[in-house]
Structures are given as C-alpha cells and as structure tokens.
Amino acid sequence: MKILYINNDGGGFADYIEVEEGTTVRALFKREVPHGQAEGYLIRVNRQPAAADQVLQDQDRVSFTAVKIEGAV
Amino acid sequence: MPTETTFGRRQLRTAVQIHTHLAGTGRLSPLPVLYDHEWDKLTNSIRRFELARNKGWQTAADSLLSDLDLSAANLGRRLDRFRIELPKTPTPMQISGPRDIAADLAALEEEFEEVDLDLQNKKLRVLTSPIELEDTYLGPFRIALHWEEIGKGACYDVVAEDPQPAEGYDHVTHPHVTDERLCEGEGSTAIRKALAQGRLLDFFTLVKQILETYNPDSAFVALSRWSGARDCHDCGSSVSDEESYGCSRCSESVCDSCRNSCEACEETLCSGCCTPCGECNGTLCRGCLEFRPGSRVLVCNNCLEKGENSDDDETPADDPPGESSAGGDGCDAPAADSQCLEEAAVPA
C-alpha cells in the first residue's frame, strides 16, 4: 500500500512511499529514522498525534517533525 | 483513510487561493536556503581588520583576527551544508491540492491558540502558546504568512504578542528572532520545502518548534540577556548581576573565575588592568605601582621600600622615564594601558 510520508528533518522529505500492510507507526519510524528517538519527534498520522502501535492504512499521511529544531543567526 | 472533515467556506476559498498561487510558481523543488549573514559578517570583519591594520592598532587587529577565523569557519560550514542539500537534478515537486491545504487549515485550529484567515490581505496568522525557554518567559508569538509572497523571499513574520525583548536589544524578542524575522537554522530547508508544497501545517509546526528551541551557540542575543546578565570581559561567559564584579580601573564586568584583586589596595581588577610588580611579580593595579626612582621599572610599595633600604648597590638606569624621548620604544615595565599611564606617578 502507499502512504504519504513526510520527514521534516534536515532537507525535508515529502513523497508517497510503499509500505507493507499492517505496518505500525513504530515500525515505520524505525525504518525511516533508524538513529532517531521517537520521543524527540512529533509523530502524526492524518494530522493527528498517533500512538506507536497504530497500524497504518493505505493513503495515510504520516509526518515526523523533530521537537527540537535549532535556529541560528 | 483520512477522516472526512467538513470545511468552512472560508477555509476552502483560502485553500484554493493558496493552491493557485503555488501552482503558478513552478513545480520544481526549491534550492536550499543560502543566507548572507555569514558573508556579511566576514566582509565586515575584514573591513574592520583593514582599518585596524592601517592605523597600526595591534590589540584590535589581534582580536579581529579571531573574529575573522570564526566568521570564515561559519561561512565554510554554511556552504558545505548548502552543497549537501543541493538536489542532484531539478526534481518535479508535488503541490498539495486545495483539499489538503484546507485540511491543514482545519488542523491549525487544533494546533494553535488562534488562527486568522485574512482573505483580503492574503494573510494567514496563527498564535502560539506562550513560549518559555530555560525559565525565561518570552510570551506568545504570532506567525503571519503572506501566501502571495511564498517563493519570492521573506514571506512570513514572527511577531511577539507580549514583547519581552532582550535587555538593550528592543528588536530582539527571542534569541532567534530579530526585527520580526526568524533565523531558521536547521529548519530552513524543511520550511522552504513545506511552503513550496503548500504543507501549511508542517510549515507552522516547524516555525513553532524552532521558537520552542534555544540554540545558545548561534543566537542573535544570548538568553542570559533577558535576565539582566552580562558577559565577562575576560572569558566571555555569561554572568548574572550578582555573580559579576566591576573592575575598579575600567569598570568592565568580570566573572568570579577571572576576577583579580590588587595585592595592595585589594580593589577588583580585570586581567587587562592587572599590572605585575617589576620585581616581586605581585598582581597590582597601576595606581599602586611606582617607577623606581631613576629607572623604568614599575614596582610595588613593598619593593620600593626594600629597594630604598638597600639602594646603595643599585645601578640607576640611563634614561629615566621623565627624560625619555616622546613615545619612546616602550619601557621594560609590564604593559599598562593609556589610562594607567596618564595616572602614573612619574618622578619629577
């Protein structure tokens, strides 16, 4: 199935990706942000905060945004 | 499937307008942001260094050389990052449809304290919760997006609703906001991309997260400036009023670690106003040192008295200070600043 995956880290990424049926939010996070800690991210599915064990559905919109983003001069 | 939501007419009209604007700006991915702060800072330091060099100001030139090194390193890092984020080829970009943009507008209502759609002025404003960084209250901020400016340059403002500017910097309402402009730092490319694609919820969320994060290494003004703190003149660390000491000679503030005391009068001194006795090497202020009669050596009272008692075997200097040529080639005594020299008790 396809989901819209948005990662607002660094250069930013937003595109449709393929995931297997039954993929949870936790599994997607581990796959896409292997070195990240879930606590350090705002994780949303269809613009709503999501639980780690939420199972993704076809055409879902999933976004990961870091809680701490450092501004600079 | 995404939950079906009933959108207000106003939200839909706004969404259509935003989509129309974005579709007209082209569908290629934007380039990473290349701010010119670092370049400006470097060229400014170069100008100041050249001035100091022309005037022969050694101390100022030394200090500016460190600034130049830092500015050049910052510029180098910025260019490296620009290259890393540069797309390999111009890639077509997906722009959110009016329905997705409207869904973002609806989600903003839940995410922020207030959301205001101003169709007439083409502005979308949201209000954050009060921001507090490391126990410093900065108040709520209104983020105002002028959607017709997306893709053309600065298209949003960050306005403090209950301004709590840094002490002495009225235009700095947040360590990373000056003159209502946010310096996006790590978030710059993601913000640019979110705006170009019409992902408004992501854009406002990114700005909010930057406002809720403090980066002490790269702030317009350090957060300590909000609590009346000052920088130590010697080591540059931030110290509160209670923990800072004023140099009795030049009035600059120093921290406890950098604080010195004159061994004679016990007054507080910064490192620049400490003058060692030319004989015992004790730390003194310039006011507690005198030239040994007939010599150029600045000594403390103790050494002066000792010297007077065993003066017979001292060899007087050839060129006592009162008789030296103007501006001579400098004395052997430790460096004393001009203020101190004016006050020096030069023997008649």
Image (spheres, coloured by chain):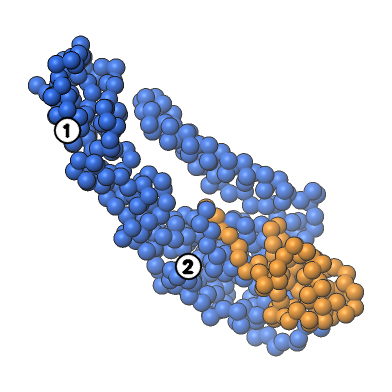
Chain colours: A orange, B blue
Residue B67 pos. (x, y %): 48, 39
Above or below, B28 against B284 in this view is below
Direction from residue B70 to residue B264 in the image, left or right: left
Mark 1 nearby-residue class (10 Å; few <14, some 14–19, many ≥20):
some
Whether residue B53 appears in this view of the structure is yes
Output the chain of dot 2.
B
The image shows residue B21, relative to residue B186, as above or below, that is below
- Total labels drawn: 2
Q: Amino acid at mark 1?
A: Asn
Name the residue beneath numbered marker 2: B134
Query: Does the image show residue B97?
Result: no
In the depicted view, which residue is nearer to us: B213 or B112?
B213
Residue for point 43% across, 63% down: B173
Q: Quadrant location of residue B96?
A: bottom right
Q: Chain of mark 1?
A: B
Q: Position of residue B151 (x, y in %)?
A: 64, 58
Nearest to N terminus: mark 1 or mark 2: 2
| Residue B79 lies in quadrant | top right
Mark 1–mark 2 distance (CA, rounded to whole Å):
49 Å
Quadrant for residue B264, please give it.
top left
Residue B170, x across and y down, in percent: 37, 60
Q: Position of residue B164 (x, y in %)?
A: 39, 67
The front one of B302 and B336 is B302
> Pointer 1 and pointer 2: residues touching (CB < 8 Å)?
no
Q: Amino acid at mark 2?
A: Glu
Can you say whether B142 is above or below B273 in the image?
A: below
Mark carried by residue B301: 1
Residue beneath the point at 53% across and 37% down: B69
Q: Secondary structure at mark 2?
A: loop
SS for callout 1: helix
Residue depth check, mark 1 versus mark 2: number of the one nearer the observer: 1
Instruction: Identify the image quadrant of the C terminus of chain B.
Output: top left
